Structure formats: C-alpha cells, structure tokens
Image (spheres, grey):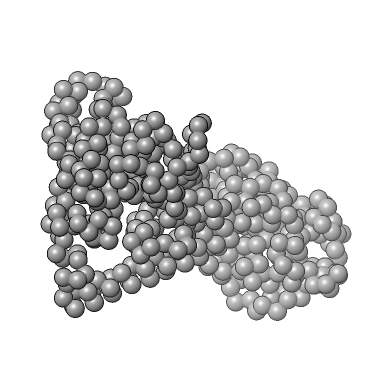
Amino acid sequence: MHVGARPPSWWDERERLQAALVPGDREERERVVSEGLDWASVGLRPRWIGDDTSTAIAAIEASNFADKGADEWRRFQTGAHARGERALYISTIGPTPDDVPFRSVFGRTEHVEMPYLGPHSRSICGDPIRLARPPRLADDLTSTDRDLALRILNEHSEDVEWVAFRPRRPQEGGFIGTWTPLLITPDAKVVAGVWRDAGACPEGQINHYMLPALPSYLPILQWLTERAVPDLVPTAAARLRKYVDAKPCLQTELERELTSRIAIIMEQYGKEKLDLEQQLDAARRAARLVRDPLLFGMGEALEDAVARVLIDADVRVVRLDEKFGTVSADLLAERGGRRILVEVKSASGNASERLVDAPLKHLRTWPQVKPDVPVDGAALIVNHQHKRPPAERSSAVYEREAFVDSLEVPVVATLQLFDAWRRADWPEVRALIGFPSELPTTSTIAPEFAEPGTASRRPWWRFGKTTE
C-alpha cells in the first residue's frame, strides 16, 4: 500500500530535532502517520516515501510533490499499468487535530491532487460545508461503491464539517474523465465521489476515490481490502494477506452467510441511523422555537416562548397586550377556574428589584381593566443575565434575602421555567407561577376573550410573533 507520507521512524527523528522549536514552527506529521494504524490487522503493509511501491495494490494520499512521494506514486502507477491492473487512489480532505480550520492531509490546499493528469493535476477541489442532516447515497451505485458510501455515513462524526467536492475545468479544454457521486446533499452537492479515467490516461485505468476525512482511516482500509481490491483489482488481491478470507468463491457457506448478514446489518444500521438523525434534527428545530427565545430573547419573542411553555403545561393563555395594550400584564393564564396575570421581563444583567412593581400594579388595576373577570394572583417571569451563557447565570432572579422574603408574587427565572419544560414536568411549570397541583382543568375564561373564536384554544403561534 503506497502511502504519500514519510515513515513514522523519519518523523520520530524529525521531531527529536525540532523539540527545541516553538510549536508553531514545528512540522506536523500527516494524519495517516500520526494515527498509528495497525496496518497488519487489515492485511496491508504500508510503503512509505522511500520504499519500493511498484507492487503496491493502491495509493492513499498520493502527491505529485517531490517531498510527498512523487517518485513513489509514479512507480506505483507504472507497476499497475505493466500488470494490466486498475490503479486505485484514495484521497481525503477534512479538519485536522492541530486546529487548522480546513486542510488536506497531503498539503494545505482545498484541492485533491490527481498527479497522473500531468499539468491538469488539480481538477477536483473541495469546500468545507456544514450539513443539518446527513447526505444520501447517490443513485445507481455499484455494490462496491455503495458499501464504501455506507461506511462513510456510519463513521463520519456528526459535529465535523463535510467537504463539497466539485470538478474544476482547466482553462484549456474540458474536464476529462468521469466524476461519479457517492454521497449527495439535499441541494445536490457531492460530499464523496470517485473519478474514473474513461480512457483519459495512457498509463492505465484509474479509480480515484475522493472522500471526507473520517476519525480514522481504518474503515477505508477495511473497505479497500474487503471489497475494493477483490472486486476491482482481483489480480492484486492475491498479494493481500487476507485474500483467501475475502474471496467469496473460496469461502465456506457459513463464512458467506455471516458476511452477507453483516452487510445487511450495516445497511440497516445506516438507514436507522439516518432516520434517527432526521428525527433528532426535527426535535431540535422544535425545541429551538422555545429554547432560544426563552433563554436569550426579549419582548414579544420572549412572551411567545413563555406562552408556549404554559400551553404545553395545559394552561390556557390569552395575550393581553393585543386587547388592552400596556395597561395590563402580558399574559392571562387560567387553569381550573384560577386566573393569574403573568408579566414577562428581560434584563441583560442582574434584574432590578423594581421589576416586581409591574405585576403588583397590574394586580391592583385589573378590576378597572376587566371587572367581570376576576384574577387570583400575578407572577413575574424574568429572563435575567441573558447575555451570559445559561450555565453562568444565577439560578434565582433575586438573591437579597430580605427582598426575597418580602415578595408578594412568584418571581421565576426563565432558566427555571425552561428546565421544567425540557423535562416535561408540567406540574412544576404550573406551580412556578402559582397554580396548585390539585386544581381541575376545566376552563372558565370569559367568552369575550375568545372572540372571534376561542382564544384559549387558538394555536400557540397565533398568540403573537415567534422567532426561529
């Protein structure tokens, strides 16, 4: 296996000599070296820069640069052509452990090297891309390519960016060869693909797989020995230590059955994982409608999030600002015949103690606003310290003991309300704003609040604007 990198022993000596340098000035090992792969476990022997690569079965991270193994890939390509074998190349692009935002392991570039094309060697480039949901398998894939695509889907880290590969036409002449997608995003971007020579290379047939970097090279190497070499380069398979084990025609019926069952399980796993990831994406989008405004919002967006939490807790809610303006509280909450005025406030820092005056004032003036609908109390909900990360905020809105003891209405931090909501602890949500747990659920909100139609039964998003 030709590897476009210096051997580990060379790097050991290099790092010994660089030990006195500051970290930023040191040359870093390629990821294919630093991972410390157990090549023998997949029946491969790496042939590094400086080794004889003429009988290698494939090349990984090949480069046309002299210090990255230009002579070695030429010997590999020449040897494959002389034997009449298809040359398999694998290149990956993606983030690296040294926090470089975006780099290829074979050079600080966004291009995949195709050294066998001479002056047109940089004809596939890649751009970093974040995906909300995993890509899908391309249509009409061969069984070998489909197996690779499934392994990539199963092994790619959810929190790591993908790479959108795209052919780049040279200034003179069109793009040569055939570019086939393996994995495709919903907007038709290719995040894994294979370039085939289609007669473009006089030095023999070529399959060049261009893939996103995975946490480990091992799944790619396993695919190479288990599927790619036996299927695409059968004459080279005899040079693999695991050739006899991997060749279907030489396996026992039990081996073939178990291999088939594993393939079915892996495919089913990929489908179930994709389905669960899509469900998770939908759940996150739904939660974000409440979580973001409740923890970081102000004004109407914050009021709407509080209303949604109360409605989820089986509390009827009316937006009072729409009917009476600012002369009343923001919300009227009702459950089991008990009504509570809810005032919603926000503060970027510590909440002022004067915020408590608002719900007390609304409680006093409510008989003049709506004398035929008596209320039983009021509550203040405050999104305080909302410029800080939630974990760094104080758990309570107010901490001065004498003031807390003097409070006449419940004062609730949105962080408390959110914590009860995320756990679906609806009795706690209701208790936070003053509803006894034993109350029945029969609604007695006055009909005039519900016109036109029943306001308390309107969808929560109709109570005001929301932010997504």
Q: Is residue 356 above or below residue 22?
A: below
Q: Residue at x 47, y 67 (%)?
A: 275
* Residue 363 % position (x, y): 76, 57
Residue 126 seen in the figure: no
Q: Residue at x 82, y 70 (%)?
A: 450
Asked whether 46 or 20 is in front, the reply is 46
Write the residue at 55% across / 44% down. Answer: 400
Left or right: where 24 falls relative to 252:
right
Measuring 16% from the left and 61% from the top, which residue is drawn there? 243
Q: Is 348 drawn above or below residue 406 in the view shown?
A: above
- Where is residue 229 shown, x and y percent of the image? 24, 56
Residue 3's image quarter? top left
Tell me where residue 122 sits by quadrant: top left
Q: Nearer the viewer, residue 444 or 140?
A: 140
Q: Is residue 32 above or below residue 327?
A: above
Q: Give the image location of residue 253, x and y in percent.
A: 19, 78
> Taking 24 as reference, is 248 above or below it?
below
Q: Position of residue 437 (x, y in %)?
A: 58, 73
- In this view, the residue in front, 122 or 204, is 204
- Count of numbered circles on the image: 0
135 with respect to 405 (left or right): left
**Residue 355 in view in this figure:** yes
